[in-house]
Every structure is written in structure tokens, then in C-alpha cells.
Image (cartoon, rainbow, N blue to C red):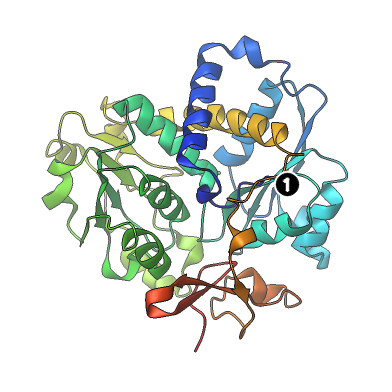
């Protein structure tokens, strides 16, 4: 069974295939109106969402299919203690494909182990958000005409911003990428992004706290919200919440071709006056997300019965047991019947990471 849990589940060629399909859908929507007739998508959202859930649902309706929806953990039997795995085994009896958002890192991966239908990760905790990455890639491709040889600045909450982690993993496979990571020290990228993606792929990157000093050299500025809901100490959020605000004055320091992306929702990190700047692409990104989710649904339904082939990530990776994961947001900390599993991500330094959430294995 083919799933989308992590953006690396798709090769670069497959991402291009999705982009090409999405562009064709945008140009010829009528050709796709019956493509999923008789099929059902279940959207299981255990955490708030506007764009991701509604764009999945709009995508399925525009493909001629139907939608079943759980819009809050409290409205499903998850509130009675039903596990993610049981929930998805049950829902796969009703639906042909499932998009799941969950507050715990690794939940969609757990769902995929026993689901009878494709699982799409629609955002797991502070970990990954691969379908936002699909929206981001199409936006960059349409704005720049390429995905290679780009200097991309990520600004804001790079620690908890799951869209950042997935987009860096995706872009790292294209040649000529340079990254500028702009954040307060406390909100720098997690170790798994640095050690699983940047270092092994020799991606040039600099870290800075100062947006103004680097904005002039960027092709893309990817702004992010400070993720209030992920902070363990609310006082830290209060201290950091206004770290960056993109204003018209700062845009005046940027190149005339720089594109501003943001996964949205925004709080105050982009001033509304920037919305009228032709370089602001974040509302185009929303529409691109719908086209890419249409392309994704088509691909996963076409491949649902197919052997995923030897390239699937977890099937060829050695996993070992170990102590309980130390990440309090890991699915294994809540669903304690799940066996802790670790994979060797850095053989040179013998670093093992949790197979669910990518936190380092406790010593
Ligand atoms: N970008 C994004 O994931 O938005 P929602 O939280 O509204 O789905």
C-alpha cells in the first residue's frame, strides 16, 4: 500500500509528476470532474485546520468523489481512548483514502501500519507536513520556473514549524540549494533536519537572527508563525511571539524577484500591507495546495493496490527496539502499547533516531 507520511516517500521524479498533473488540473479542470466518481476520502483531523482539511475536501469534490469528515478529536471515539491504529482500521472500511492530522508526532505513520487504504499525513505535531510541501513546491515552480539553484530563507519558528522540516527535506534533493535559517536561537531547526538532511547532502546553510541583513540575497522568503500551541512554557511564547514582522520597509530591502511564501495561518508575522506586493505568494499557495492535493489523491488511489517496490523507506531499514522515546509529543508516549523503534540515521556517529518522531534515542 502506498502512503504519504514523509515527503521523502516520493522521489524527485514523482514530485515532478504530481506538479505536472496539478498544472494540468489547473488548466483543464473539466477533464478531472469524474476522475474519482464513487470514491470516498475520509478527513480525520484531530487538530484545528482551515486550509488543509477544506482543500482536501474541495479536491475530492472537484474530482467527483465524496468526503467523510472528523473535524475534532472530541467528536470521534478517540475521545474514549481509541487508538490511532484502531481508528484507521475502522475508517478504512468506509473510505478509499484517509487524510489525517494529529497533534502527536508519528501518528500518521502508526495509522499506515494497519490501514487497508492509503494514509496521507496532513500534519503530525511539530514534525512533518508533506502536503503543505506539495503546495509550496508547486508555488515555487510556478513563480520561479524551477526548483533547483535557489537561495531560500526560512524565517520564524524553525523548531516547531513542521512545514519547514518537510520543505527543507524536499528541496535538499534539488541541486544548487542554499539555505538561510532566520530564527531566535531557541527556535532553530531540530537536530534531525540538521543531521539527517543538511549535513549528509552537504547543503550550504547559514543561521542568523537578523532578517534585514540577509533578505536582499534571497530568491524565496518562507515566513512562518511562531507555533504557540507547541510551547511547553507559555512565557517563552510571549517572549518570542513578535520576533519577526515582515513589513513594507523590509520588503524594500529585498530583490524585485523574491517570492514571499507562508503556509498560513498568519498571526502578525507578515503585515497586511505586504499582501498587495506582487511578490506576496501566500494566497496563490493556498490554491496551489488544492491542485496538488487533487494530484496526490489521484496518484495514491491509482497506486493503492500496487506493490510499492523496494524503494519504500521503512521496508528496507533496520529497526531496533530501545527505551521509551524522550519526546513528550511522540505518539509512543501516549499510545504505550506501541513498541519503541529506532533506526540508524547517522552510521558515522552511531546516531539512532525514533522511527516515529525522529528524536534521538535516549542513552
Ligand atoms: N497550512 C496549514 O496547514 O493550514 P491549516 O492549519 O489551516 O490546515
Q: Is residue 140 left or right of residue 314?
A: left
- As drawn, 100 above or below 292: below
Residue 229 in percent (x, y) is at 51, 62
Would you say 343 lies left or right of 231 here? Answer: right
Secondary element under disc 1, as helix, strand or loop, is loop
Whole-percent x, y for residue 202 in the image: 27, 58
Q: Position of residue 205 (x, y in %)?
A: 23, 57
Residues 104 and 315: in front is 315
What residue is rendered at 50% in x and 61% in y?
A: 126
Q: In the displayed structure, would residue 363 be above or below residue 224?
A: below
* Residue 216: x %, y % from top left: 13, 42
In the rendered image, which quarter is residue 301 located in? top right
Place residue 295 in its image quadrant.
Answer: top right
Give the residue at the far front of this rendering: 310
Q: Compared with residue 135, is residue 349 higher up or lower down, i.e. above or below? A: below
Q: Cβ of disc 1 within 8 Å of ligand 1?
A: no
Please state the total of marks drawn on the protein image. 1
Q: Is residue 103 visible?
A: no
Q: Who's the residue at 56% across and 29% down the image?
A: 290
Side of 255 relative to 54 (left or right): left
Residue drawn at (32%, 68%) of the image: 239
> How dense is the environment of label 1, judged by Cα within 10 Å: few (below 14), some, or many (20 and up)?
some
For this orientation, the residue located farthest to the bottom is: 363
Q: Is residue 144 visible?
A: yes
Of residue 58 and residue 237, the one placed in the foreground of this image is 58
Q: Nearer the viewer, residue 142 or 300?
A: 300
The residue under label 1 is: 1
Amino acid at each position: 500500500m502506498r502512503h504519504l507520511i514523509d515527503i521523502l516517500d516520493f522521489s524527485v521524479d514523482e514530485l515532478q509528476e504530481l506538479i505536472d498533473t496539478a498544472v494540468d488540473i489547473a488548466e483543464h479542470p473539466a477533464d478531472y470532474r469524474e476522475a474519482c466518481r464513487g470514491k470516498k476520502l475520509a478527513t480525520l483531523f484531530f487538530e484545528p485546520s482551515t486550509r488543509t482539511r477544506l482543500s482536501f475536501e474541495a479536491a475530492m469534490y472537484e474530482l467527483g468523489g465524496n468526503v467523510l469528515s472528523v473535524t475534532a478529536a472530541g467528536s470521534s471515539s478517540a475521545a474514549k481512548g481509541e487508538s490511532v491504529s484502531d481508528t484507521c482500521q475502522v475508517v478504512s472500511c468506509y473510505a478509499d483514502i484517509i487524510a489525517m492530522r494529529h497533534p502527536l508526532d508519528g501518528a500518521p505513520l502508526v495509522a499506515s501500519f494497519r490501514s487497508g487504504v492509503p494514509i496521507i499525513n496532513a500534519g503530525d505535531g511539530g514534525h512533518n507536513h508533506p502536503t503543505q510541501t506539495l503546495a509550496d513546491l508547486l508555488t515555487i515552480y510556478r513563480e520561479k520556473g524551477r526548483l533547483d539553484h535557489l537561495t531560500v530563507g526560512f524565517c520564524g519558528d524553525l523548531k516547531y514549524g513542521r512545514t519547514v522540516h518537510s520543505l527543507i527535506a524536499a528541496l535538499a534533493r534539488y541541486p544548487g540549494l542554499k539555505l538561510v535559517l532566520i530564527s531566535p536561537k531557541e527556535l532553530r531547526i531540530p537536530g534531525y533536519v540538521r543531521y539527517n538532511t543538511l549535513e549528509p547532502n552537504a547543503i550550504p546553510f547559514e543561521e542568523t537572527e537578523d532578517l534585514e541583513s540577509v533578505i536582499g540575497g534571497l530568491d524565496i522568503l518562507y515566513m512562518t508563525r511562531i507555533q504557540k500551541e507547541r510551547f511547553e512554557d507559555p512565557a517563552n511564547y510571549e517572549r518570542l511571539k513578535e520576533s519577526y514582522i515582515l513589513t513594507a520597509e523590509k520588503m524594500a530591502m529585498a530583490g524585485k524577484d523574491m517570492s514571499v511564501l507562508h503556509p498560513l495561518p498568519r498571526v502578525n508575522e507578515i503585515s497586511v500591507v505586504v499582501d498587495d506586493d506582487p511578490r506576496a505568494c501566500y494566497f496563490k499557495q493556498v490554491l496551489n495546495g488544492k491542485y496538488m492535493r487533487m494530484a496526490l489523491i489521484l496518484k495514491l488511489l491509482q497506486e493503492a493496490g500496487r506493490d510499492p517496490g523496494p524503494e519504500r523507506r521503512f521496508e528496507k531499514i533496520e529497526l531496533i527496539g530501545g527505551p521509551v522515546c524522550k519526546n513528550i509529543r511522540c505518539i509512543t508516549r501516549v499510545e504505550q502499547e506501541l513498541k519503541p523503534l529506532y533506526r540508524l540515521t547517522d552510521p558515522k556517529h552511531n546516531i539512532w533516531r525514533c522511527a516515529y518522531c525522529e528524536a534521538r534515542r535516549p542513552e
